[in-house]
Image (cartoon, rainbow, N blue to C red):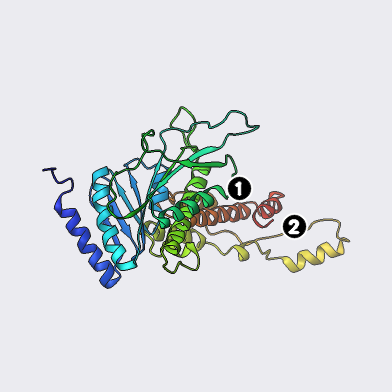
Amino acid sequence: MKPKLVEPAPLAQIETDLDALLRDGKPIRHDFGNGNRLHMDRPLPFLCVHVGSHQDAAFHAVSANASYLIAADIDLAGEVARLVARRMRDHCGAFLMLDIGELAEDRFLTEDVPFLPPFEIALACGNTAAEKAALKRFATAASAPEAKYRTPRVDELNPTTRAEARLWDDPGDAACLTVRFAPIYRAPGTNRVYPELRDLVVANMVDSALQAVSAFLKASRLEPPATHRSLGRRVYIDAVVRADRAIDEVASTFDFLLAVTPINAEPAWLEFQAGAFERVPALLYRPLEFEVAAQKRKLYSVSLDHLEDPLLTRLLSEKRQELDLQLSMLAARGTPGFAELGRALYG
């Protein structure tokens, strides 16, 4: 008899968590050692799965979803995913597992291109019409964005010839879409990462996965969401709240409009007018009650690395950049650089 691959305790606790989710709407965020985690912020007809403990782009793409499983062990992933699939399929009427990972290497698919060659995305699915609809939509969505660096080329993932095949051969009777993409965000032959390119890949994978789920639901003759983005997160982890509060704490230390408003505006205008508008008058400002450099250090001490949501990460990053420029403007009051920084901030 084949030994049981998963200890009863994690599965029993997950079963209890699923009961609470379906009965009371209580979100699940269950960590069960070795980097294993099940996160479901509400009952949803899909589960994104990633096997492995390395926090690569596939890890971040999966953990950005409202329903995901990170498992260091293949067998554990299969056991937990099948349990979730059974319960959610009974509740939602249909259920799709998205097995997302990375290919072992970034293969150049062709040499005869004027710039950078396309990169590989390999897909596989079951034989049902709904699974095929999900695969088709994922392929279309992943190929649609105008690439800033390299364009994707979608191919079929052949589990008999590629080492990056399905994580488990038997998903049970659950529908499954397997996604593998080339690690184009890594510098060839090194462990160095291009952060901007990684973020673009993650955002593309997340959006394509949600579009695939929407197509799957429609093909399953269930009512699809008004927009695939409504399948995204509604519950955010504590790290998001902490980052937002830390950035807001910096923003609340100064009143930007008050600080850039001259205290001698009327006399300065009269002086400017009296001089036939030829000589710029001296402008006087209120003294700052803080050190600009200290606030900038505080601003950039806020970590945005583990928020599990690409959109929120980008929004908070843009807010941090805005505050950085505002602080730079305050430091440059009364200098020619003030106007240049203003143009950088407001256009």
Tell me the quarter of the image containing the C terminus: bottom right
Residue 191 screen position, x and y as percent: 43, 32
Of helix, strand and loop, which one carries label 1?
A: loop
Q: 41 or 255: nearer the eye?
A: 41
Of helix, strand and loop, which one carries label 2?
A: loop
Q: Is residue 115 above or below residue 36?
A: above
Residue type of the residue flagged with mark 1: Glu
Which mark sits nearer the N-terminus, 2 or 1?
A: 1
266 vs 225, left or right, is right
* Residue carrying label 1: 146
Residue type of the residue flagged with mark 2: Ala
| Residue drawn at 44 percent across, 62 percent down | 219
Residue 304 screen position, x and y as percent: 44, 51
| Residue drawn at 81 percent across, 67 percent down | 270
* Residue carrying label 2: 282
Say few, some or many: other residues with alpha carbon within 10 Å of mark 2 (under 14 / 14 to 19 / 20 or more): some
Residue 207 screen position, x and y as percent: 49, 55
Q: Residue furthest left?
A: 1
Circle on res. 191: none
| Residue drawn at 71 percent across, 53 percent down | 339
Residue 201 screen position, x and y as percent: 50, 45
Q: Is residue 169 above or below residue 325?
A: above
Say few, some or many: other residues with alpha carbon within 10 Å of mark 1 (under 14 / 14 to 19 / 20 or more): few
